[in-house]
Image (cartoon, rainbow, N blue to C red):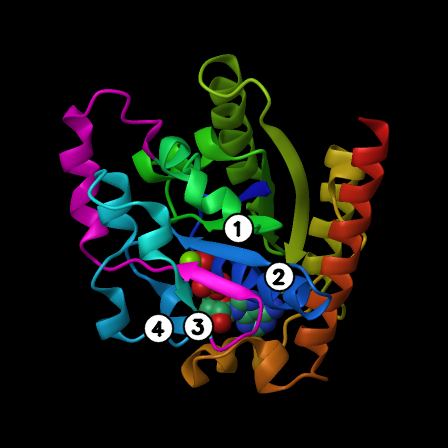
């Protein structure tokens, strides 16, 4: 079971869109995926059509140690994808958890549950909130790697250095094995000079960390959540869905290469 945090402290860069559609793409090729909704806004939960009644127990109970992870997992309509949902309750947890001992290790400890191992998920994708708060720190401490969506727009790389600094700090303290999984360029517009410039800069600065696959701007990706399904279900042959399938293939290929190296 590999744990991947999808993080970027900037909002609106496609963290949640990537969590939902990468999960669906991996499931389509037979992988079992658990999405952890770590954002109090609960966009990943809504995007998978999880109703309020299905959110009686959430990631909040999990972090507070009031529930075992296996009892907060909800199946989605997408075969092979389950989710630990979130609610706005989670936003107060930052304050409450502040006094808890080992407060950065709450998610890591929760994911170490024996019951979870028995569920045999191949991947856990953590959809992080748009800040470097305690919730994101919990995700980075629990994760094997960080996947960074980068919106193809000006200042995109500036925000990245702050995230890289946080990753380095976590590596030096709570999670020495934390790796950068890769950087995914999102909302790319091939005809736009700025998009092209951001791509050039990112590839020059970050080299192999940047995925070959680029996610184009595609309205189907933004429409799908209002139908409570991934774009892969909403419009399976849309450019957005096809791009996420291609990305999932590259993601899996990188992972199998690394396993061979290890
Ligand atoms: P984050 O989770 O980083 O805040 P979201 O995944 O919620 O970002 O994306 C922000 C907004 O942009 C959402 O309305 C989403 O539907 C839209 N969006 C994301 N990726 C794309 C894309 N490739 N093309 C068009 N719209 C997109
Ligand atoms: Mg989000």
The span picked out in magenta is 77-106
Percent x, y of residue 29: 73, 66
Q: CA distance from mark 2 to mark 1?
A: 9 Å
Q: CA distance from mark 1 to mark 4?
A: 17 Å
Write down the residue under mark 1.
Answer: 125
Q: Earlier in the sequence, mark 1 or mark 3?
A: 3
Report the residue at 48% width, 18% height from top: 169
Q: CA distance from mark 3 to mark 4?
A: 6 Å
Which secondary structure, mark 1? strand
Badge 4: few (under 14), some or many (20 or more) residues near its Cα, within 10 Å? many
Q: Earlier in the sequence, mark 2 or mark 4?
A: 2
Q: Please say if the residues under marks 1 and 4 sit with CB atoms less than 8 Å apart.
A: no
Left or right position of 147 against 38? right
Residue 256's image quarter?
A: top right
Percent x, y of residue 125: 53, 50
Left or right position of 234 against 133? right
Q: Please say if the residues under marks 2 and 1 sit with CB atoms less than 8 Å apart.
A: yes
Q: CA distance from mark 2 to mark 3?
A: 13 Å
Write down the residue under mark 3.
Answer: 48
């Amino acid at each position: 079971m590999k744990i991947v945090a999808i993080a970027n402290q900037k909002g609106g860069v496609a963290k949640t869109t990537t969590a939902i559609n990468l999960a669906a793409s991996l499931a389509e090729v037979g992988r079992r995926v658990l999405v952890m909704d770590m954002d109090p806004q609960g966009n990943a939960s809504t995007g998978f059509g999880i109703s309020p009644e299905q959110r009686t127990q959430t990631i909040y109970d999990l972090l507070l140690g009031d529930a075992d992870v296996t009892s907060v997992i909800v199946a989605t309509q997408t075969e092979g994808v389950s989710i630990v949902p979130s609610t706005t309750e989670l936003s107060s947890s930052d304050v409450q958890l502040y006094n808890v001992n080992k407060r950065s290790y709450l998610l890591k400890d929760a994911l170490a549950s024996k019951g979870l191992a028995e569920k045999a998920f191949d991947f856990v994708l953590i959809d992080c909130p748009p800040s470097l708060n305690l919730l994101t720190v919990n995700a980075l401490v629990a994760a094997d790697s960080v996947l960074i969506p980068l919106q193809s727009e000006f200042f995109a790389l500036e925000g990245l250095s702050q995230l890289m600094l946080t990753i380095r700090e976590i590596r030096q303290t709570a999670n020495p094995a934390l790796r950068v999984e890769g950087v995914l360029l999102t909302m790319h517009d091939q005809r736009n000079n700025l998009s092209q410039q951001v791509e050039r800069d990112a590839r020059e600065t970050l080299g192999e960390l940047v995925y070959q696959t680029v996610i184009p701007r595609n309205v189907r990706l933004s429409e799908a959540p209002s139908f409570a399904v991934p774009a892969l279900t909403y419009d399976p042959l849309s450019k957005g869905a096809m791009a996420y399938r291609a990305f999932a293939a590259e993601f899996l290929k990188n992972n199998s290469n690394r396993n061979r190296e290890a």
